[in-house]
Each structure stands twice: as structure tokens, then as C-alpha cells.
Image (cartoon, rainbow, N blue to C red):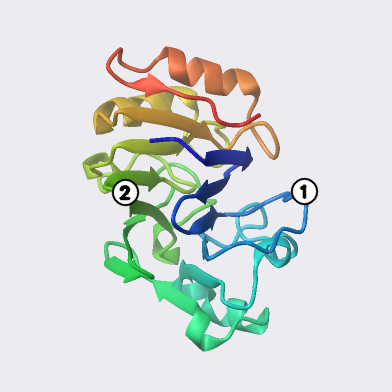
Amino acid sequence: MLENIKVLCHSSIRVQKEKVIYIDPFKIIENCNDADIIFITHDHYDHYSEEDIEKIRKESTLIIVPEPMGEKVLNNGFTKENVIEVSPNKKYEVKGIEFETVPAYNINKQFHPKENNWVGYIIELDNVKYYIAGDTDITEENKKVKCDVAFVPVGGTYTMDFEEAATLANELKSKIAVPTHYGSVVGKKEDATNFINLLNPEIEGKILMK
């Protein structure tokens, strides 16, 4: 289920299957210009980086963003045909790929207000559902997510810490749980290891960040 999937840095994920997909590209090392689809969870600099998007986009690249970001992306040179604006709690299909949006917000912090309508994504690829939580705490909405693989932030400060992330992962009962949002802007490598150590035995914890 994790074949050809990498956590590149922080919350930046690259998926190479039938399509090349990036989620929240950040600190991309090389100009590869190979993205078929880019998913953006919200507009903080470590998730929406125009500099890094330039390194992966090509003429046909589609970019999927929360609705409040539509104008910003158009101003960055994307055409209307290549921009898909999404809202929380909706289902979509793009280039044959089905996905749905899950609200991503803070409960006890002010960094990611619910009213901003920022999102996480459940993306279905090869009959596997991948949940990319975005920057979030444990919420009533994300506790109901059904997925096979969960990518959850563990670094604390702006999101869940590793204990909270493990609580959510155990609630979701996914087959695999992958820690993100550590090792760069916030959070330490130990947060990822501690997260995995708190997972229920039936959930496989995998560290994908090199």
C-alpha cells in the first residue's frame, strides 16, 4: 500500500502510481516538473509554497485547493481549467481519481480556525483509501474517517502532538499509520518514533521520511 509513496519533508508527500501526485509540496530539492495533480490542504507557507510548486508543475498540472485559496492560485499562473476549489465534507472525482475532503482545524489553538474551511483529503488509489489529515487536532469529523492508510501530524505546537496523533490513529483503525509534520518546521524525529510506539498492535506504523 505504500509502494512508490514518500514523505519528502515535513508534510510533503509524493505518490507515484498511475498519476504522479503531490500533497503540500515543500522543500523540493530538484526541478522535476512531473506533477499530474497537486493537493493543497491550506495556505500556510509550509503547505502552500509557490517556490516548490514551480519545481513540480507542468503545463497540464491540476491543483486542488480549499475554496478560499482559488484566487491566490490563479494569480500564481494557473489557468481556471487547471484549478479545482474544494470545500470540507464533499466528494470529488478528478482525472479518474476519487477523493473527499475532511475538515482540518484546531480545537484548542488559534492557528487553523474551523471557519477557514481548510481540509484534509481521503484519496482513493488502486482501491486503497489514503487519509492525509492536514494540520488538525482530533475532531468529531476526522474521528469518523474510514481509511486504509492514515498520514497524521505528530509534531505538536500547531497540530496534534504524538500522543494525540496516536489516539486518533487508534480510533481510525487504519491498517497503516504514517507520521508527518515533524523534523523541519516543528517536531523532532523522536515524535515519529514515539507515535509508532503508542499505536495499537494491529496498526502498522511506518516512518517514510528519510
Residue 85, numbered circle: none
Indicate the secondary structure of the residue bearing disc 1. Answer: loop
For disc 1, the marked residue is: 29
Q: Is residue 49 above or below residue 208?
A: below
Q: Nearer the viewer, residue 13 or 138?
A: 13
Q: Amino acid at mark 2?
A: Asp
Q: Quadrant for residue 197, please give it.
A: top left
Q: Which residue is mark 2?
A: 126
- Residue 130, given in percent of the width and then of the height, sits at 36, 44
Image quarter (top left, top right, bottom left or bottom right) of the C terminus: top right
The reply to whether residue 66 is visible in this rendering is yes
Q: Residue at x 44, y 38 (%)?
A: 151
Disc 1 to disc 2, C-alpha distance: 28 Å
| Residue at image coords 66%, 35% | 186
Viewer-proximal residue among 10 and 61:
61
Residue 52 location, quadrant? bottom right
Task: In the rendered view, tell whether residue 128 sits above or below residue 206.
Answer: below
Residue 169: image x %, image y %?
34, 29
Percent coordinates x, y for residue 33 in the rendering:
68, 64
Mark 2 neighbour density, 10 Å: few (under 14) some (14–19) many (20 or more): few
Which mark lies nearer to you, 1 or 2? 2
Under circle 2, the secondary element is loop
Which one is in front, 102 or 30? 30
Determine crowd level at label 1: few under 14, some 14-19, many 20+ residues with C-alpha closer than 10 A. few
Q: Residue furthest front?
A: 18
Compared with residue 96, is residue 83 higher up or lower down, i.e. above or below?
Answer: below
